[in-house]
Structures are given as structure tokens and as C-alpha cells.
Image (tube, grey):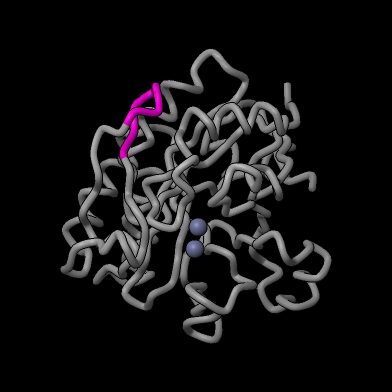
Amino acid sequence: MLKEFKADLHIHTCLSPCGDLKMSPRAIVDQAEKKGLDIIGICDHNSAENIEVAIRVASGTKVNVLAGMEVTSAEEAHLVALFDRAEQALELQEVVYASLLPGENDERIFGYQVVVNELDEVEDLNKRLLIGATTLTLDKFVEIIHSLGGLAIASHIDKESFSIIGQLGMIPEGLKLDALELSPRLSREEAKVEFSQYADFPLVCSSDAHFLEDVGKRSTVFLLKETKIGEIKKAFGNVAGRRILS
Ligand SMILES: [Zn+2]
Ligand SMILES: [Zn+2]
């Protein structure tokens, strides 16, 4: 039987340098419960080190955590990758870490990159330049994400900075994206007009939250059998009744 699931597929934790330090996995899951979210995607910049904790703190709650990452391509465009399991995101992380531009995070400029445990205690400070780009092109990223069984969604296409359209002026033909994401500032109706040439792509609305109060600020309601990547993929393709409701 198909059910409605409310999803916010793009949320940063305190591991992202720009993420508020209050964005611990535990606090995010609590907030997601309060906002009535059924599915959340944990997507830190170029890292997945807080995913396993997020999945653990969500177990036993109504919130299902998808293991995600917001990667930065060589074109300096952001792409959301989403997986069912932490191991898949950690495999992507290995590839990303090997192709990050050299340099260390300057905490005074970009902010702390905090790995935490279930009790919100600091486990580690990540020193990599997570805010920077990688040497992997968009094409290559989409190929890797798909080979790992994930979904590749173009981040905040309505934003000038770090979106595929902002960086390249268009979505390259043949780029096998699963969906396009809208930031909270553009409605689905406005997007259908502004991006009418990309009407073939499914649209998702996500918060891209960096602060607790923004979790669930935008969401996508899916009709699915269960909260699995394969089901969301079917919803993108309107397969067997699965679909995006709003
Ligand atoms: Zn982004
Ligand atoms: Zn983001």
C-alpha cells in the first residue's frame, strides 16, 4: 500500500563549516519529528562523517534518515547525493576526499567542522577543506553516485551561487540528473515558469537548512511504499502509482 511521506532531503549538520554548531544529528532528528517530517537527507559539504550517528539517533523515531552528501564538482556546482545506507555515502566520501582541492579548513573564516556522537559530544574536528571544490566533474559525479546506487539531484537550481545553472548558465544536455532541487525562496509554480525548458526533470523542494529553525522549512511530499531510494526513484518516474504529491 502506498503512503504519503513528507521529506526534507537536504539538511546540513555541524560538520559543514557553514552549518550552525547547534545542528547536531540528535537536534536535527528532534526538530524533524516536531516538524512532522518522515524522511530527512543529511547532506554535509563533501563529507558524510555525521551520517552514522544521525541514523542511530533516528532509529526508534518516526524519522527515516537518508545518507547523503552535498558534493562540489570541478565546475564549483553543488550536487546532492542520497543513499539508503551510510556505507554507500562513506564510499562516496572516499572518492571525494581523494579529489578535494588541497588545503586545510580555516576555522576563523569558514567555521568549525564538527564530528559528534549521539550525545552531542565532539568526537573530532575535520581539518579538510570541505567548503572547497573537488577535481571531479558533474558528469563523473553523477556516474559515481549512480554506480553506488544513489540519487543525484542538482542543488538549489534557483540560486546564483554554486548551482549548476549559476555556474554554467544551463543544465548540460545529457547530464543524467534524477531531479532538480528548488531552494525555499522559489515556489514550485514559479519554477515551472522560470525553468520551463527543464520540465522533463522532477522537482523537489528542500530546506538546505544550516540552522535548526530551518529544518522542514521546505519539503516534498511523496507517495511511496516505503522510505527507500528505489521508491523515490520510482516517484520521480511516476512508476506504479509512486509520485510527488506536492
Ligand atoms: Zn549548496
Ligand atoms: Zn546545502
* Image quarter of residue 13: top left
Number of marks drawn: 0
- From the top left corner, tell me how far across and down residue 237 is, in percent: 64, 50
> Measuring 51% from the left and 32% from the top, which residue is drawn there?
65
Q: Is residue 134 left or right of residue 215?
A: left
| Outermost front residue | 108
Q: Which is nearer the eye, 64 or 150?
A: 64
Q: Is residue 123 left or right of residue 34?
A: left
Residue range highlighted in magenta: 115-121
Rendered view: 84 above or below 155: above
Query: What secondary structure do most residues of the magenta stretch adopt?
Result: loop
| Outermost bottom residue | 169
* Quadrant occupied by the N terminus: top right
Rendered view: 55 above or below 94: above
Rendered view: 26 above or below 67: above
| Outermost top residue | 60
Q: Which is nearer the eye, 147 or 124?
A: 124
> Measuring 43% from the left and 26% from the top, which residue is drawn there?
55
> Measuring 59% from the left and 42% from the top, which residue is drawn there?
212
- From the top left corner, tell me how far across and down residue 140 is, in percent: 31, 66
Rendered view: 63 above or below 188: above
Residue 30: in magenta span: no
* Image quarter of residue 223: top right
Q: Which is nearer the eye, 108 or 192?
A: 108
Q: Is residue 129 left or right of residue 239?
A: left
Q: Which is nearer the eye, 227 or 174?
A: 227
- From the top left corner, tell me how far across and down residue 151 is, in percent: 47, 49
